[in-house]
């Protein structure tokens, strides 16, 4: 790309925005979907269905050789773990896509006891047509999450690992995050030479996302 990487942040509903049209061939989608606590009006069962449907929508809206990457942390509800990695798998399969890789990111040092959320997060990458030869494998466990720009952010080290993968293994040079929060993935994408497009329902967070610098 010529010139400095660009960033666009739209204030609005990411699902509605994404559903308007398929993304161009050079666009990858990288996001973290909201937890049930962030959409209380759906109820837990309604949120599960919504989550799977939105993952499927994300996968359908990227080009065949492009990728969707999902960063999700499990939660505990009524003493039971809610495995968001499993829910992402459900959505990927519903869209007719396949899993390219599934990594674990250590949120705290190994051996640390945590409450409410586990010591790790999932990062899952899906595509319809792209395949990776065995010789292009990368580490399955990322030892550090990196800086957290806000409480629900994707860690900067996790974002950087995703950005390096996109540059090295795909033709995608624009990162789209329909639930961008304060814009961590957008800023990291720019730092790796890629353009970025974000959508955020909160006007305040959208304004932060437009100017976030790491």
Image (spheres, rainbow, N blue to C red):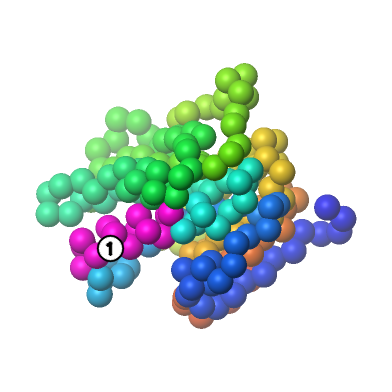
> Which residue is most to the right?
2
The residue positioned 40% from the left and 44% from the top of the image is 93
> What segment is highlighted magenta in the picture?
43-56
Residue 2 quadrant? bottom right
162 above or below 6?
above
Nearest the camera: 112 or 30?
30
In the displayed structure, does residue 30 sit left or right of residue 52? right
* Numbered marks: total: 1
Q: Can residue 25 be seen in this snapshot?
A: yes
The residue positioned 39% from the left and 49% from the top of the image is 94
Q: Can residue 191 be seen in this snapshot?
A: no
Q: Position of residue 4 (x, y in %)?
A: 81, 59
Residue 40 within the magenta-colored segment of the rendering:
no
Q: Secondary structure at mark 1?
A: helix
Question: Magenta region, mostly helix, strand or loop?
Answer: helix
The residue positioned 12% from the left and 54% from the top of the image is 78
7 above or below 28?
below
Q: Position of residue 176 (x, y in %)?
A: 60, 59
Neighbourhood count class around disc 1 (C-alpha, 10 Å): few under 14, some 14–19, many 20 upward: some
Q: Position of residue 138 (x, y in %)?
A: 56, 27
Q: Position of residue 85 (x, y in %)?
A: 35, 43
Quarter of the image with the C terminus is: bottom right
In the displayed structure, does residue 125 sit left or right of residue 115? right
| Residue located beneath label 1 in the image | 47
The residue positioned 51% from the left and 47% from the top of the image is 69
> Which residue is most to the top?
135
176 above or below 11?
above
> Which residue is most to the front?
96
Residue 8 quadrant? bottom right
């Amino acid at each position: 790309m010529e010139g400095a990487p660009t960033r666009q942040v739209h204030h609005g509903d990411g699902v509605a925005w994404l559903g308007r049209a398929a993304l161009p061939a050079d666009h990858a989608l990288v996001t973290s979907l909201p937890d049930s606590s962030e959409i209380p009006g759906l109820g837990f069962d309604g949120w599960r269905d919504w989550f799977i449907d939105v993952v499927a929508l994300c996968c359908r809206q990227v080009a065949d050789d492009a990728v969707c990457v999902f960063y999700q942390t499990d939660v505990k509800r009524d003493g039971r773990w809610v495995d968001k990695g499993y829910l992402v798998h459900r959505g990927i399969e519903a869209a007719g896509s396949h899993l390219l890789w599934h990594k674990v990111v250590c949120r705290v040092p190994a051996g640390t006891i945590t409450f409410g959320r586990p010591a790790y997060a999932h990062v899952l990458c899906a595509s319809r047509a792209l395949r990776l030869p065995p010789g292009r494998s990368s580490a399955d466990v990322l030892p550090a999450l990196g800086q957290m720009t806000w409480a629900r952010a994707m860690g900067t080290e996790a974002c950087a690992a995703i950005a390096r993968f996109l540059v090295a293994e795909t033709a995608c040079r624009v990162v789209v995050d329909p639930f961008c929060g304060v814009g961590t993935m957008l800023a990291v994408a720019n730092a790796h030479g890629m353009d970025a497009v974000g959508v955020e329902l909160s006007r305040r967070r959208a304004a932060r996302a437009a100017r976030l610098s790491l």
